[in-house]
């Protein structure tokens, strides 16, 4: 989707403890293209930093989809709340 909707869709992989061996992050996927990821526990502040550096900061028509463990979802929700992005 990211290539198909370039400029409109972005995936950011975040792993708190990525494996460094065995293909892409240890999942066994061998690829010519190394997939980028962010390493570390996602906090509200880290999420705000990623939103500021990885997007154009135009959230008027933006849609956010998140999935992950509870702490991850809480951090993302808190960051979106700081930016006054409504829950829908």
Image: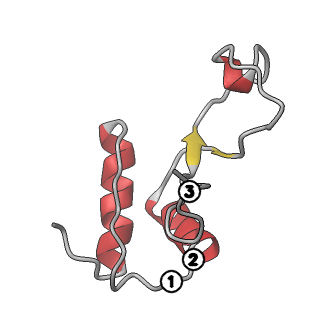
Res. 57 mark = 1
Task: Give the secondary structure at mark 1.
Answer: loop
39 with respect to 32 (left or right):
left
Query: From what the image shows, is residue 58 above or below residue 5?
Result: below
11, 21: nearer the viewer: 11
Location of residue 66 in the rendering, given as x and y in whole percent from the top left corner? 35, 50
Among numbered discs 2 and 3, the one appearing first in the sequence: 3
Nearer the observer: mark 2 or 3; the answer is 3
Q: Are marks 2 and 1 in contact (CB under 8 Å)?
A: yes
Res. 52 mark = 2
Q: Quadrant of residue 40?
A: top right
Which residue was labeled with disc 3?
4
The residue located at (35%, 62%) in the rendering is 64
Give the crowd class for mark 2: few <14, some 14-19, many >=20 residues within 10 Å.
Answer: few
Among numbered discs 3 and 1, the one appearing first in the sequence: 3
The residue located at (84%, 31%) in the rendering is 32
Location of residue 87 in the rendering, given as x and y in whole percent from the top left corner? 18, 68
Location of residue 52 in the rendering, given as x and y in whole percent from the top left corner? 57, 77
Task: Give the secondary structure at mark 3.
Answer: loop
């Amino acid at each position: 989707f990211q290539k198909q909707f370039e400029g409109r869709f972005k995936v950011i992989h975040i792993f708190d403890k990525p494996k460094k061996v065995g293909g892409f992050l240890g999942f066994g996927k061998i690829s010519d293209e190394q997939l980028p990821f962010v390493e570390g526990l996602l906090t509200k502040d880290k999420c705000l930093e990623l939103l500021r550096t990885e997007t154009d900061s135009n959230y008027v028509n933006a849609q956010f989809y998140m999935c992950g463990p509870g702490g991850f979802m809480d951090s993302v929700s808190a960051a979106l709340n700081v930016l006054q992005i409504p829950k829908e």
